[in-house]
Image: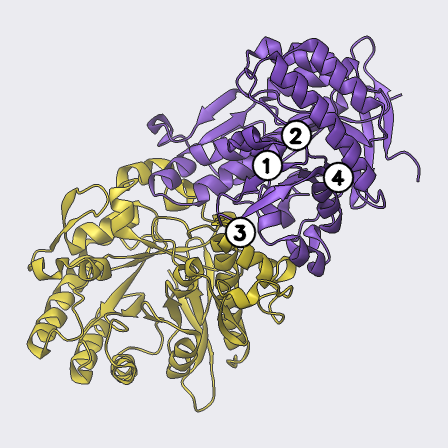
Chain colours: A purple, B yellow
Amino acid sequence: MSAPFTLLGQNGAAKGRRGCLHTAHGVIETPNFMPVGTYGTLRGVPSHLLPDLGAQVMLVNFLHLFFYPGPEALARAGGVHRFFSIPVPVLADSGGYQVFSLGSHRKVGEEGVPFQDPRSGRKELFTPEKVTQFEESMGMDIGMVLDVCLPHDAGRKAHEKAVAVTHRWAERALAAASRERMLVFGIGQGGTFPDLRRRSAEGLASLPFDGYGIGGLGIGEEPERTFEALEASLEGLPEDKPRYFMGMGYPQDIARAVAMGVDLFDCVLPTRNARNGQLFTSRGVINFKRSVFKEVHAPPDPACACPVCRHYSLAYLHAMFRQREMSAAVLATVHNVAYYLDFLAKIRENTASI
Amino acid sequence: MSAPFTLLGQNGAAKGRRGCLHTAHGVIETPNFMPVGTYGTLRGVPSHLLPDLGAQVMLVNFLHLFFYPGPEALARAGGVHRFFSIPVPVLADSGGYQVFSLGSHRKVGEEGVPFQDPRSGRKELFTPEKVTQFEESMGMDIGMVLDVCLPHDAGRKAHEKAVAVTHRWAERALAAASRERMLVFGIGQGGTFPDLRRRSAEGLASLPFDGYGIGGLGIGEEPERTFEALEASLEGLPEDKPRYFMGMGYPQDIARAVAMGVDLFDCVLPTRNARNGQLFTSRGVINFKRSVFKEVHAPPDPACACPVCRHYSLAYLHAMFRQREMSAAVLATVHNVAYYLDFLAKIRENTASI
């Protein structure tokens, strides 16, 4: 099989790059953004609309799909795309971040990590082998390996250990993978310590991954530390493989990271904030819950061509919010996702091809 | 102005009829069904999709829109279509039924009825003049007049009085209407007493309305009483005006009423029941919350061409419900509305033209 990632060009002196990632369910142009459909769908956005919104890939969460509908049901359906009617490639987050955010990182052992489903209460020991093999059987296009994600202020010793365990888990995940259809991405850690970041990245770079995630950032540390750590991670990674900055961020963060050489992004901001009334627009963030919009019969963003900005006004969204109408969340999510994807498309246009 | 309603044909010996109702925002082919967007929008269904779902008209509730955004804000926006981005004609329910269902019918006086907004707590005295004039200033295509709707078991005396007050209110509403753009429909009452029903209908028929609603039915009485009362109402109404059976019903009720000569329907069933997981299909009603559908990778209704049946399975809808995902309600509503409208389109096809 030829290399799944093709680097198409680089932006002069800047490190921004343009590329193509080939997956079993289609090509992803990079740089690109993956909207988050934790449980198999973007909250409020029917999946068949994803291509119309410009989505070329979507993120789901392995842990949550493991507990429902479960790997067996997904395999019987013919995979996650068939079960959830997803018309684009799918990347599965391994759950390292969920383990951290739900407080289970304290229970990480050499073998794996026990995790309790917050919905059903069911417990399961997750190992790197199990995660990667189940990601494959669920029909994912890209599977992230299980990693150890710590709080940013866990201290150097703990981060050093997390980097070592993450590396051993990465080797075990790769050894367990069939490598038949699913691309496997490693995940670099190291907190905000540049030398640990570089060590983690270089270690993973020595393993034959299809791409690399940079994890454990944007979780409370100072923004300048985030970008320092990102830079150190990128220095340790090979040029010919895609780099995925996990969980980031605001459009300006994404633009900055692209210029540093990042290819893929995901973030809950456009979807989660939409449900709180926040819209990303070419004139900045606005919140349609504010009563100042009660009679503003203009689209959220006149420069935006999404179905929401073509058909609805801020007054309409404000009325829907006032009336506790789910259309408010649905339409705001559609706009924000379209806005992010359009922003990334513009970044691609402005990143030179060879 | 020529008559807004054209009768195109009748179905042989049966009384089923086909027609066209011309309104300021477009033509409504009859028989037809009006999906309910109480507060200016169908819960969960972006209004710009209405024509794609086959909708030719939508119902909103005057009382709720009176309290928010209010008649002044609607007039300043250029009308309800502009404020709520509604691409089809709009019929405004006068609020007589809301007054009943929220228990305020006991306060009805000759002048009007005081009503308290359940959301804001604001009180207002509604009169037939005020309702019709505000419906006009809000830009409605069809305005129902204010009527007195009583519980079905209120007794003959109370119903007799309600018929008399409703008639006087109908005269006052007509006198207050400008008749410039908005069609005005009267509403017949009379409980389940056939003679009162006929008296109410004949009284309204003597007034120059553009159409006639049959109200106060389907609110707890025996189904056979419903149709008996409907028949008596229809006997009193002119053939050349549209007849609207308010608030009904299941598809089989609609088919029966069409055969009796009804032209228009509205009902919350397809929208409200969708939010409880109930789908109307060509094979009967099914509920996707049932765990038996967990792995049914087939559309809700293979005979349906709606976007939901084209793209999603029962297993997907079941998963969305399990995951408390609003897509479950959104997609079920889209399907049910499309199903009802397709059902009415088929009835029209089977009702002969001249």
Q: Look at the picture and state if B278 lies above or below A34.
A: below
Q: Work out how far the residue at label 2 is from the one at label 1, CA to CA, in angstroms.
A: 9 Å
Q: Please state if B155 lies on the left or on the right of B346 as rendered.
A: left
Q: Amino acid at mark 2?
A: Asp
The residue mark sitting in front, 4 or 1, is: 4
Which residue occupies the foreground of this view, B29 or B86? B86
> What element does badge 4 sit on?
strand
Q: Chain of mark 4?
A: A
**Residue identifier under label 2:** A342
The residue labelled by disc 3 is B49
- Please state which of residues A264 and A341 is positioned toward the viewer in this rendering: A264
Q: Disc 4 versus disc 2: distance between alpha carbons?
A: 23 Å
Mark 4: which amino acid? Answer: Ile
Please state, as top left, top right, bottom left or bottom right, where the C terminus of chain A lies in the image. top right
As measured in the structure, the alpha-carbon distance from the residue carrying label 3 to the one carrying label 4 is 34 Å
Give the chain letter at badge 2.
Answer: A
Disc nearer the start of the sequence (4/1):
4
Q: Residue at x 8, y 71 (%)?
A: B161
For the residue pair B101 and A212, the one nearer the viewer reads as A212
Q: CA distance from mark 4 to mark 1?
A: 28 Å
Taking the image as shown, residue B217 lies to the left or right of residue A311, namely left
> Residue placed farthest to the right in the image?
A2
- Residue at the disc numbered 1: A306
Kindly identify which residue carries mark 4. Answer: A142
Query: Dots 4 and 2: beta carbons under 8 Å?
Result: no
Q: Residues within 10 Å of mark 4 (few under 14, many from 20)?
A: many
